Amino acid sequence: MRGFEVAVRAEAALGEGPTWDTGARRLIWVDILGSRVHTYDPASGHRTVMATEQHVGAAKPRVGGGLVVNLRDGVGLYEPGGRDFRWLLRERVPGRRANDAAVAPDGSLWAGTMRYDEAPGGGSLSRIAPDGTVRTVLDDVAVSNGTGWSPDGRLMYYIDSPTRRVDVLDVGDDGLPLDRRPLARVDRGFPDGLAVDADGCVWVALWDGGAVHRYTPSGELDRVLELPVPRPTACAFGGADLADLYITTARTGPDAPHPLSGSVLVVPGAGKGLPQPAFAG
């Protein structure tokens, strides 16, 4: 496996949520605290930046084009080109903001929240159906972060960062998770965003850990990807064959951040990813 390269040199305060948009062949990522949604086409080098009116925890492609965004006050929809916006779900909770989100195999959005002060129990994980119907799945979390599914869709992986665990849950016939239990415990920084590869292994970015770990389906740590930045935030497979691992990073926090903090890094040929579904709404 080759070492990392710089995909996008940037100074994002809190780069997060890399997502490969298969239809558009581009990477989507956000700067949460900068209230920006970024795209990057590795084939041409073309980049775009779109401002949002609120802190944006995640942005995911929609079936038919456009984006679904997890914003401070709820979940919204952008039409293609980012010109038209409407709320799908709006519920402002003072002191709370959106964080990471993921699209499930059935096309629903799983949106996480957290308090700005990271208070225990102040966050949640909710399932938002394409029609805006919402169901809170977990309501006692601190910093809702990485969420993903096994290749067969029968397992869900989830991270509440302060627990320093990667949890695994069974997926019931109704698509909802059951029997939450630890898959792996992290003793280096805090687990943040995750990506599941075609082998069913879970790649986890380590906030304040300066690395990405890969865990097997049994929870064994079998790869460590060392990085120069102290705060990698999330990772996703992308590129034409879904073999390249893109890693977002944060600049916020350290008094003297690494020069690459806030950039998007990439490890070419890191593995084999899974196509990510688009939000069905």
Image: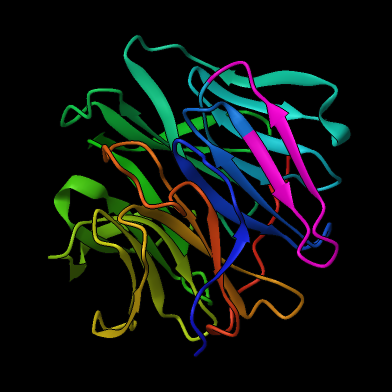
Of 106 and 6, the residue lying toward us: 6
User: Is 66 included in the stretch rendered in magenta?
Assistant: no
In the rendered image, residue 20, in percent from the top left (x then y), is placed at 67, 60
Of 20 and 3, the residue lying toward us: 3
Residue at left 80%, top 59%?
45
* Residue 38 picture quarter: top right
Residue at left 62%, top 31%?
36
Q: Is residue 85 above or below residue 199?
A: above
Would residue 16 be found to the left or right of residue 232 on screen? right
Residue interval drawn in magenta: 37-54
User: How is the structure coloured here?
Assistant: rainbow
Q: Is residue 34 above or below residue 179?
A: above
Q: Residue furthest left?
A: 187
User: Is 41 included in the stretch rendered in magenta?
Assistant: yes
* Residue 124 picture quarter: top left
Would residue 247 be found to the left or right of residue 275 on screen? left
The C terminus lies in which quarter of the figure? top right
In the rendered image, residue 139, in percent from the top left (x then y), is placed at 28, 33
In the rendered image, residue 264, in percent from the top left (x then y), is placed at 55, 56
Residue at left 80%, top 38%?
66
Of 21 and 125, the residue lying toward us: 21
Residue 97 seen from this side:
yes
In the rendered image, residue 220, in percent from the top left (x then y), is placed at 23, 84
Q: Is residue 207 above or below residue 156?
A: above
Residue at left 15%, top 51%?
163
